[in-house]
Amino acid sequence: MNIDPKSNICGHPATITRDALRRMAQVTVTPAQFKKMLQYNKRLRMAISKPELFLSELAKAGYLEANQEKNGEVCYELNTNGYQLANASALKRFTRKQANKEFNSLIERALSIEESGYYLDRVSRITVFGSFITDSETVGDIDICVEFERKTELLNGENYHQVQKALVEIDEKLGQGFRPQTFSETISYSVTKAKKFLKNRRPILSFHYIGEIEESDYPRKVLYEKQDDTITYYDPLTGKKVLEKKGI
């Protein structure tokens, strides 16, 4: 999905609304909690002066679900439209050639994760939806959902979270990896690190949660998957097998 950075959504610049929704991904918030979240981002805090009204307008526009709690408070969470807007790109559309090159590089990074002992998790499946799997000559972005599974062969019977904790400490000493900012990033350090490597700061790649796809009727294609000891990569348009690596 693409948005015009000069347009407005619910009375605010489109990029402000999008970035606010990104901060709400996978959480349910009250207006008071949302206001507190804004305190950590000066740009959003200055732009959204009335958080409660902002959330109410987004719900009316169909981007949020509003639920009444037992104590009378209203809680908001992103729905399918909200996630789509949260992951929207404000960039110019890419040519098909550019998009194919970017996706092939993504596959190479997924294979690199598979072969590296640096990551405790591997890419088990990449599902793609949106304009990239159509015959459109241009692509707004590449909408993807990446699923992971643990590399049990690296654990040697050790507890996954204990090994991951040790990995965090090693990365900190060596000055590599990233510094977790939230509890969620701490407990999912290995997966988050792999995602950051896959993303590679490429603006054309738009990562989505598996729930977004499962709850929607978007046409989709699995373009990369690992089953047992075989990795298969499929062509985005034809769905035909492009690459198959066995003995992985």
Image: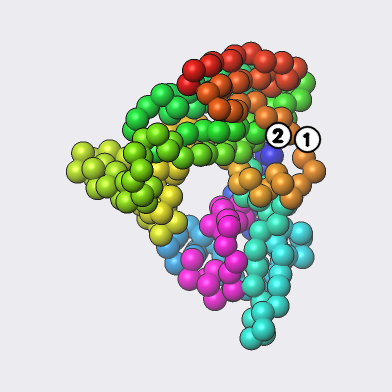
Q: Which mark is residue 129?
A: 2
Q: Do the CB atoms of the residues marked 2 and 1 lie less than 8 Å apart?
A: yes
Q: Which mark is residue 95?
A: none
Q: Position of residue 63 (x, y in %)?
A: 71, 58
Identified at 34% across, 39% down, the residue is: 156
Between residues 44 and 72, which one lies in front from this camera angle?
Answer: 72
> Is 26 situated above or below 143?
below
Q: Position of residue 69 (x, y in %)?
A: 67, 79
Q: Main secondary structure of the magenta part?
A: helix
Q: Is residue 189 visible?
A: yes
Looking at the rendered structure, the number of numbered marks drawn on it comes to 2
Residue 73 in the magenta stretch? The answer is: no
Q: Secondary structure at mark 2?
A: strand
Identified at 72% across, 26% down, the residue is: 133
Magenta stretch, residue numbers: 16-37
> Is 170 situated above or below 17?
above
Between residues 106 and 151, which one lies in front from this camera angle?
Answer: 151
Q: Residues within 10 Å of mark 1 (few under 14, many from 20)?
A: few
